[in-house]
Structure formats: structure tokens, C-alpha cells
Image: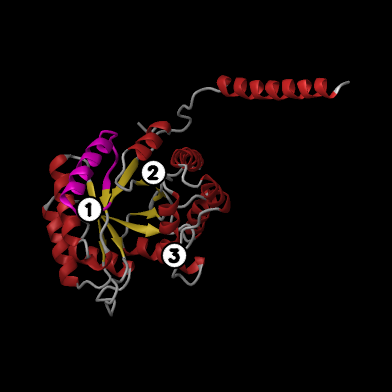
Amino acid sequence: MSQHTLNRLQTIETLLGELKQDLAVSLQPARQETHAKIPFSFEFFPTKTDDAQAKLLSTFKELGELNPQYCSVTYGAGGTTRERTLGIVKSFREQSAIPVVPHMSCIGDSKAEIGELLDCYKGLGVKRVVALRGDLPSGQVGYGELPFALDLVKYIREHSGEHFNIKVAAYPEMHPQAKSFKQDIKNLADKYHAGANEAITQFFYNADSYLFLRDELAKLGVHQENFPITAGIMPITKASNLIRFADNCGADIPRYIRKQLTDFGDDTKAIKEFGFEVVYHLCQRLMSEGVPSLHFYSMNQVQPNKRLVESLGLV
């Protein structure tokens, strides 16, 4: 058999292989809901300019049309975005009936300042808050009267009774400053016993880390039906931002994801498509394992979050 004939046979074999793959893809059923619908929510962060705030309000309106369970608003280190956070909460409340959940941090703040803010939120009709320790602002010395989130949870209950539903942070891959997984999970259980109603996790891409946290917490007698652990979900849209966020908060990006993002370089479209597939399948796995709800770190963007929510059959 001549080399020319061999080359033609190899070409035909390659084409047949590609045709087989194309047929397999075309015969696959369209993505459809395979799990019961679960609640979902979005997180937004305060903006620094009027133009950015106008865009944020537009984003909130568009994502609000998906009917999220609530939307949260972050709070800067040591209250550095206090006024902007409060302003956004007021704007969201005026624009929509969707419950707004402000973040509150305690580090560096006095009880009087936190009490005043609680009273303000209560006056606005806010019924849920996210209680966090927060980060100490650069140059500030001392942790204040309430140095840890556990202290903040206790103070909210002391000051406001049962008015607020209190959400706290959970760390599937351990808080970066925790001494051990065991101590970190015990701290989460302590927040529950102090009056927290539910937890929202730091973002992660390894579903097993979430399941480990859930199961270890159950061993301490804290179960999902009493203390739901909402999975925090970060859409992947830009490699540099994701890696920076992960490095700052101690979240792990699996090696295969880092490697693929590196290989894509500046190919934004490829990064977004790859990121969508990673996060979509992560959410599917979590839903199959009975996750009570999903909380999307929106980064004040519409499309990545809307696409995920719709593709997962949550609306």
C-alpha cells in the first residue's frame, strides 16, 4: 500500500472520528432541570462613583427579575464603606420588594456604632443581616469591643432580640487564620449556638470541601434543617481577578482550573465558556447533594449570573 493511500485512509479515519463526535453532541438532549428548584441569591458591593451606582441599580433591577430570595450588600473593612453600603441598601429597598441583606463587620467598631446601625436597618424594614468579623483597615490598631464574628452575633441578639435573621460566614477550605479545620468548624457551631440562623460559604470549586464541612458540622449536632449552609458561588469571568480574590481570602483554585486559565491567556471568550462549564457542573453536583440554596457573588455583573441561574433551571 502506497504512502499516498495510507495518508488518505488516515484522513478519512480522522474525519469519521470528528463526525462521530459531532453526532454524539447533536444527539445529546438540551440541558434541562434534573433537580428540584432551590432558592438562590446575589451579592453586590458598594460602588465609588455616581455613574457606577446607576449601573449597579440597573444590574440589581435586571437580576431582580429572576426573583432571588434576597440580595446582600458588602461592607468595607472597619466600616470604610458604611455610608455607601447604607445608601445602596436604601436604594434597593426603594426600588424593589426583594429583601436586602446588608453585611455588618465588627472589627474596629464600637458597640454604640453597631447598635446605631442595627437601629437604622430596623427602621428601614431590614430583617436579615450578614454578621462578619471583617478585616482590620490598614494602619488601625486594636480590634475594638467586638473582635470576632461570634461576639457580633451575641451582640445583635442582645441588642435586637429576634428581629434579625443572622447569616454568618463558613469556610469549606478553612478560614486562613484558623488553627485547624476542627477549630474552624467548632467556631461555626458556636456562632449557631449564639443565635446565628444560617451560614453562607466562602466561594470554592471543590464540592467535596463543602460536603466535608456539612458532615463535620453534623457530627457536632448542627444539621442543615436547623442551620442551612448556603453555598457561595463565584462565576469565572476573568482569570486575574479570580486568582487575586482567591489568594486574598484563602480559597483554593484547583490546579486544573489554574492551568487551563493560564493556557487561555487573553482569550476572554474561552475563559468565560470554560468558567461557565466549571461552575455549572459544580452547582449541579451541589444540588444533587441537597444544598439548600446558592448565593452568587455577582461582582455587580448581570450576564454570568443570569446565565447560570437560567441554565440550572432555578427560574
Q: Which mark is residue 47?
A: 1
- Residue at 41% across, 63% down: 248
Q: Position of residue 98 (x, y in %)?
A: 22, 41
Q: Position of residue 89 (x, y in %)?
A: 18, 51
Which sits in the foreground, 170 or 45?
45
Q: CA distance from mark 1 to mark 3?
A: 27 Å
Q: Residue furthest bottom?
A: 141
> How is the rendered protein coloured?
secondary structure
Q: Earlier in the sequence, mark 3 or mark 2?
A: 3
Identify the secondary structure beneath mark 3: loop
Looking at the rendering, the stretch of residues picked out in magenta corresponds to: 45-71
| Residue 118 lies in the magenta stretch | no
| Residue of label 2 | 293
Residue type for callout 2: Ser
Q: Which mark is residue 175?
A: 3
Q: Is residue 112 left or right of residue 175?
A: left
Nearer the observer: mark 1 or 2; the answer is 1
Nearer the observer: mark 3 or 2; the answer is 3
- Residue at 54% across, 49% down: 257
